[in-house]
Image (tube, grey):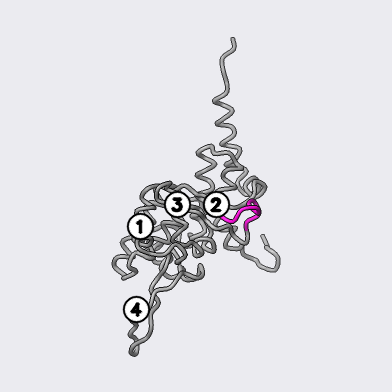
């Protein structure tokens, strides 16, 4: 199948086919934590992947998060609307509930910091000698390409298919919501997209969820 002038499917299309189970995502997070610890990421790599997995947000949204967007008392992260989002044009942020372990992961990044500061940061390095790099300063994450190398190593260690993409975390989050029988409109709103897009790309999962709900309404009338 061709996509315009390309003979291969775009990354977003490939990712939609990569629906990860909860156990696989847990494995990815555990592997990320181990790799982060041994590679001197200071928790930065684990934090951003944990947020991506738990919110289903796009990388372009996550890198714009500020300290003030985390609401520990509500176990909520206020995700900024994506420039690509089409389902939430009239709002600037989306309140996405997260598990307490996500909040705990982010606590070091919100303690004693200003609400306007970038939430997720990473170390920038400078070359101090030939083949020698040292930590220079901290700055916000910028683009998805910064995850390319560490993600490849993480996936290699998990023994998942090597073409598994970070974007699969988003699609797996959408499917999880549908399988848990959340209304399609709510799943779309939480993921900053439209119900039309959900129905187009996840119709099988929407149908399964609706069938399950319909089965629960069946009563014996004889």
User: Would you name the residue on which mark 4 appears?
Assistant: 135
Residue 157: x and y in percent read: 36, 62
User: Would you name the residue on which mark 2 appears?
Assistant: 94
Task: Indicate the quadrant containing the N terminus: top left, top right, bottom left or bottom right.
Answer: bottom right
Pick whichever of labels 1 and 2 is earlier in the sequence: 2
Residue 52: x and y in percent read: 47, 57
User: Would you name the residue on which mark 1 appears?
Assistant: 107
Residue 222: x and y in percent read: 59, 9
Q: Nearer the viewer, residue 102 or 219?
A: 102
As drawn, the residue found furthest toward the left would be 38
What is the secondary structure assignment of the residue under circle 3? helix
Q: Which mark is residue 5?
A: none
Q: CA distance from mark 2 to mark 3?
A: 14 Å
User: Would you name the residue on which mark 3 appears?
Assistant: 54
Residue 215 is inside the magenta segment: no
* Residue 187, placed above or below residue 132: above
């Amino acid at each position: 199948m061709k996509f315009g002038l390309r003979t291969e499917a775009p990354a977003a299309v490939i990712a939609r086919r990569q629906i990860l189970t909860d156990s696989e995502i847990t494995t990815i997070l555990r592997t990320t934590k181990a790799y982060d610890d041994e590679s001197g990421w200071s928790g930065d790599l684990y934090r951003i992947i944990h947020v991506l997995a738990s919110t289903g947000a796009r990388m372009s949204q996550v890198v714009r998060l500020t300290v003030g967007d985390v609401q520990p008392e509500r176990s909520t992260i206020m995700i900024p609307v994506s420039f690509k989002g089409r389902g939430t044009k009239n709002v600037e942020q989306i309140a996405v509930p997260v598990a307490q372990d996500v909040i705990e992961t982010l606590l070091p990044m919100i303690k004693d910091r200003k609400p306007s500061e970038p939430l997720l940061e990473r170390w920038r390095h400078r070359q101090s000698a030939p083949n020698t790099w040292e930590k220079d300063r901290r700055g916000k994450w910028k683009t998805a390409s910064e995850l390319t190398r560490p993600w490849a190593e993480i996936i290699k260690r998990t023994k998942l298919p090597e073409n598994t993409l970070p974007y699969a975390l988003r699609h797996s989050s959408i499917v999880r919501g549908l399988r848990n029988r959340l209304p399609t409109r709510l799943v779309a709103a939480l993921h900053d997209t439209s119900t039309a897009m959900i129905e187009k790309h996840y119709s099988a999962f929407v149908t399964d969820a609706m069938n399950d709900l319909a089965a629960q309404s069946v009563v014996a009338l004889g």
